[in-house]
Image: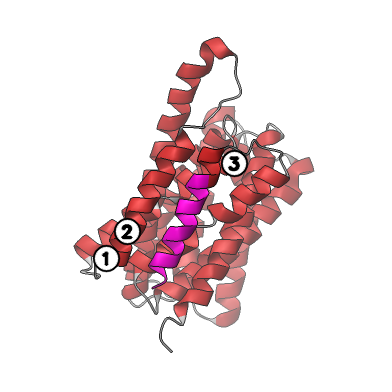
């Protein structure tokens, strides 16, 4: 059925959005990003391995290697994303972070010869406008004197996270078209992510730290991100990355709504207009 991948991509979007909300909750509780990522990976890796073994679907080959590559870029993308959330509103940081799909789509169009339609061009244009509107309202939680410097550092950190996530989305598509199943790619990624999380924590703390009282946050983030990623990889088997990755990464619509109503973040006209542009882009990309 034509566009049968769209419901899968939309479900991926929903779970990614919930995962980003958990990241913000962890940041508000003061949990360092490198410690929080450990709390996730101790659930994520066993889940991927258990599902792969139970379904006998783990295949060691090129797709698995793509998954390992994605593990490197995704780890540092989430690390910088979590750091950005400690200073900025989730209803601003998450939309910018998830706009990484622009890079994923551009790479797919350039290197995989995916079609560049008028709708996609208009969608990308709307997303650029949305990013500018949202970043103009990035208020960091520091004194007025230090606000400018802190805001610039937050924007740089967020930019690095966004670029890395965009590259990750493109790697997922390469793994999907290389004939790999979703579990093989997930498992390859999880193994590398697990290793980097533990090495990073040991490098910073000189020991491995488990913050047991926040174990529920690690489990929740791992569950939502696992479901979001699995559904994304499934959708990529049936449709173009330049459409599917943008839709799945529109999870910031879910995150922004939660941020405004649960975390009581300010409702400003720039934020509303930025989110409206993003939603308009979803509609265009679905055509």
Pointer 2 with pointer 1, Cβ within 8 A:
yes
Q: Residue at x 59, y 63 (%)?
A: 14
Q: Secondary structure at mark 1?
A: helix
Q: Which residue is mark 1?
A: 118
Which residue is farthest front?
Answer: 269
Q: Is residue 46 above or below residue 213?
A: below
On residue 211, the disc is none
Closer to viewer: mark 3 or mark 2: 2
On residue 90, the disc is 3
On residue 122, the disc is 2
Pointer 1 with pointer 3, Cβ within 8 A:
no
Q: Nearer the viewer, residue 100 or 45?
A: 100
Which of the two labelled residues, at mark 3 and mark 2, occupies the earlier sequence position?
Answer: 3
Is residue 276 one of those drawn in magenta?
yes
* Label 1 environment density (alpha carbons within 10 Å; few <14, some 14–19, many ≥20): few
Which of the two labelled residues, at mark 1 and mark 3, occupies the earlier sequence position?
Answer: 3
Residue stretch rendered in magenta on the structure:
273-287
Q: Residue at x 44, y 25 (%)?
A: 153
Left or right of 170 in this view: 257: right
Q: Residue at x 36, y 58 (%)?
A: 123
Q: Residue at x 40, y 38 (%)?
A: 132
C-alpha distance separating marks 3 and 2:
26 Å
Q: Secondary structure at mark 2?
A: helix
Q: Secondary structure at mark 3?
A: helix
Give the number of marks: 3
The image quadrant of residue 33 is: top right
Q: Main secondary structure of the magenta part?
A: helix
C-alpha distance separating marks 1 and 3:
31 Å
Task: Give x and y (percent) for residue 4.
Answer: 46, 82
Q: Is residue 58 above or below residue 131?
A: below
Which residue is farthest right?
Answer: 213
């Amino acid at each position: 059925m034509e566009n049968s991948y769209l419901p899968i991509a939309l479900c991926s979007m929903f779970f990614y959005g919930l995962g980003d909300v958990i990241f913000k909750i962890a940041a508000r509780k003061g949990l360092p990003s490198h410690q929080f990522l450990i709390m996730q990976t101790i659930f994520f890796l066993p889940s991927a391995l258990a599902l792969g073994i139970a379904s006998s679907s783990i295949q060691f080959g090129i797709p698995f290697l793509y998954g390992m590559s994605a593990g490197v870029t995704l780890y540092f993308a989430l690390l910088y994303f979590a750091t950005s959330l400690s200073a900025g509103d989730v209803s601003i940081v998450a939309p910018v972070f998830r706009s990484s799909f622009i890079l994923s789509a551009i790479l797919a169009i350039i290197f995989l010869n995916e079609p560049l339609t008028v709708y996609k061009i208009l969608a990308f244009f709307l997303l650029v406008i949305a990013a500018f509107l949202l970043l103009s309202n990035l208020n960091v939680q520091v004194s007025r004197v230090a606000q400018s410097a802190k805001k610039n550092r937050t924007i740089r950190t967020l930019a690095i996270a966004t670029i890395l996530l965009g590259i990750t989305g493109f790697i997922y598509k390469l793994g999907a078209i290389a004939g790999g199943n979703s579990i093989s790619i997930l498992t390859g990624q999880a193994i590398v992510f697990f290793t980097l999380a533990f090495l990073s924590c040991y490098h910073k703390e000189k020991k491995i730290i488990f913050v047991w009282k926040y174990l529920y946050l690690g489990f929740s983030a791992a569950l939502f991100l696992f479901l979001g990623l699995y559904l994304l990889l499934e959708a990529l088997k049936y449709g173009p990355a330049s459409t599917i990755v943008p839709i799945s990464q529109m999870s910031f619509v879910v995150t922004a709504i939660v941020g405004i109503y649960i975390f009581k973040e300010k409702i400003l006209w720039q934020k509303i207009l930025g989110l409206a542009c993003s939603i308009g882009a979803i509609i265009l990309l679905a055509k």
